[in-house]
């Protein structure tokens, strides 16, 4: 049995299981990115698959990339605003 969830359901699930993983806006962007996929909501799996970064300099601490273009060649990048974004772990 499946239930389609809305954005508030998505945010609520994260607020209980992983409250510090994504920003309010980040959760909206991730929800919109995943909305058309027929997936089971698994907050822990999503938290392990996607990571939010405030800026590119944070990414450089975790990965050996020199530019946003190089990062986009290696993984999915979901922009939140002009500086922050979510990446799919690779």
Image: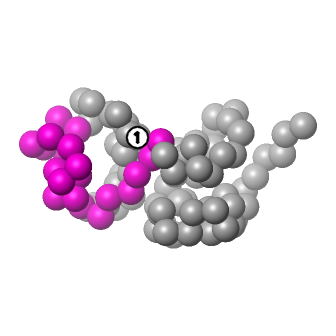
Viewer can see residue 69: no
Q: Residue at x 40, y 51 (%)?
A: 51
8 over 5 or under it: above or below: below
85 over 15 or under it: above or below: above
Q: Residue at x 17, y 35 (%)?
A: 70
Q: Residue at x 69, y 33 (%)?
A: 38
Quadrant of the image occupied by residue 16: bottom right
Whether residue 69 sits left or right of residue 15 in the image: it is left
**SS type, badge 1:** strand
Q: Position of residue 73 (x, y in %)?
A: 24, 30
Q: Position of residue 30 (x, y in %)?
A: 52, 51
Magenta residues (range) = 49-71
Q: Nearer the viewer, residue 44 or 11?
A: 44
Quadrant of the image occupied by residue 7: bottom right
Quadrant of the image occupied by residue 56: bottom left
How many numbered markers are drawn? 1
Q: In which quadrant of the rendered image does the C terminus lie?
A: top left
Q: Mark 1, residues whose alpha carbon is within 10 Å: few (<14), some, or many (≥20)?
A: some
Whether residue 40 sits left or right of residue 47 in the image: it is right
Q: Residue furthest left?
A: 66
Q: Position of residue 6 (x, y in %)?
A: 72, 56
Q: Residue furthest top?
A: 73
Asked if residue 66 is among those painted magenta in the image, a careful observer would answer yes
User: Which residue does the numbered mark 1 point to in the structure image?
Assistant: 88
Q: Position of residue 13 (x, y in %)?
A: 68, 61
């Amino acid at each position: 049995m499946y239930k389609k969830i809305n954005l508030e359901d998505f945010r609520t699930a994260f607020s209980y299981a992983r409250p510090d993983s994504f920003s309010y806006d980040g959760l909206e962007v991730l929800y919109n990115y995943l909305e058309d996929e027929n997936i089971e909501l698994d907050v822990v799996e999503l938290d392990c698959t996607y990571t939010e970064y405030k800026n590119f300099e944070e990414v450089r601490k975790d990965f050996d990339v020199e530019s946003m273009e190089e990062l986009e060649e290696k993984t999915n990048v979901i922009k939140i605003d002009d500086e922050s974004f979510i990446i799919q772990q690779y």
